[in-house]
Image (cartoon, rainbow, N blue to C red):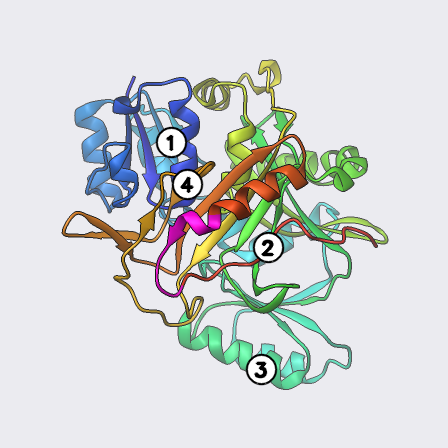
Amino acid sequence: MKILIIGGGGREHAIADAFAQHEAAADIFLAPGNAGLAREFPCLPLRSNTEILDWCQREQPGLVFIGPEKPLAEGLADRLSEHGIPCVGPSQAAARLETSKIFAKALMAKHSIPTATYASFSDHPSALEYIRGQGKFPLVVKADGLAAGKGVVIAGDVDEACKAVAGFAKNIGPDCGIVVEEYLRGWEVSLFVVTDGTSFQTTPFAQDHKQLGEGDTGPNTGGMGAFCPVPEAEPWRNQIEGQIVSPILAALRAEGCPYRGWLYCGLMITSSGPKVLEFNCRLGDPEAQALLPLLLTPLREVCSAITEGWVDKLQLKWSGQSAICVVLASQGYPGSFVKGHSISISPRLGGRIYFSGVGEIDGNLVTGGGRVLSLVALGNDIEAARRKVYQDLDAVKFSGKTFRGDISRRNNTL
């Protein structure tokens, strides 16, 4: 059976690797993929939804798995479903849970789902007026649309908050909506939901490291590493499923857009319980790189349960091991950076490598993005996995290699 994975980053490499545990690699296609991925799997130069649909109509894949958010925001899942092509990914309407923070916050407020208190604005002057009237900081300022993980600013004072609005106007658009939230105190954790729109199951918890520098300092990035599982979060699982997961799925059904696919719940564990920071309408990156290597159930079986509506009968099984993902980035990321640095990978590499921002010059891999690749190692516990992944760092070399040395060293206490 042909399987088409949409995307070309570390998340999509991890998805392809998970499929390949039970499928032939030659049957797993990526569009567009990247130069590193192309050394393991066929990659297709398909970038627009029209090109993808045309290929699917010709080749009739048994499954399409949509990795990133942009194709979902553009309605790719809807177009594939209209042509009878099985697809893992929510509809454009359901994907508003990620593509519109204003929609998501309003839906949570309507259905009493615990989240930060907020105010939303369709015009920037009103947002600035509201910010200038606030007396309690920090505040969280968010852009309403997609922003590649860079649409959130934690502002320590009025000036920072106003600069955030100005930055969103410049980088995203002068008409983008603005959400201003209270700053939640606690510790963050991610939980993924497998759902067919009615029934659902949840995965082990994972924890992302979003800021560039060690000790959670510096600017927000798309994610500098992750680990899985997070034992400290387990006491909250039933409450999260009962007060957050089940109600948000019911809310989307009530809106006429049942959610089918993988749902990311970004959570803050606070002194008053778990609260939603954000929802994403797909697997997270880099959390997927730490989560999927632990999946024992064939990924195609999980996807069939989603598309055919039997998630309640799915036997979702996970390894008892731990996994850590460390992202290697280009110097200067998430700001400007230089591409084209040669990448060397030693045969001594013991764990897994998932390629993200990678190109090719004269047959050699070179850096081609901000986040270049992910290193992943498994162990019997977090410390064992940690030792392995950091030993692998010396096996990968490129000029300007940037990484965090404290992945998994979080103090998950209130």
Task: Tell me the CA gap for discs 4 and 2.
Answer: 18 Å
Q: Amino acid at mark 4?
A: Ile
Are the residues flagged by discs 3 and 1 in contact, CB closer than 8 Å? Answer: no
Task: Tell me the CA gap for discs 3 and 1.
Answer: 42 Å
* SS type, badge 3: helix
Tell me, for residue 16, which label it has, or none.
1
Q: Tell me which label, 4 or 2, sits earlier in the chain.
A: 2
- Residue lying furthest front: 348
- Residue span colored magenta: 393-400
The residue closer to the viewer here, 337 or 264, is 337
Foreground mark, 4 or 3, reads 4
Task: Tell me the CA gap for discs 4 and 3.
Answer: 40 Å
Label 3 belongs to which residue? 162
Q: 326 above or below 27? A: below
Q: Residue at x 37, y 55 (%)?
A: 397
Q: Residue at x 21, y 38 (%)?
A: 44
Residue 135 in which image quadrant: bottom right
Q: Callout 4 environment at 10 Å: few (<14), some (14 to 19), or many (20+)?
A: many
Task: Tell me the CA gap for discs 1 and 4.
Answer: 12 Å
Q: Amino acid at mark 1?
A: Ala
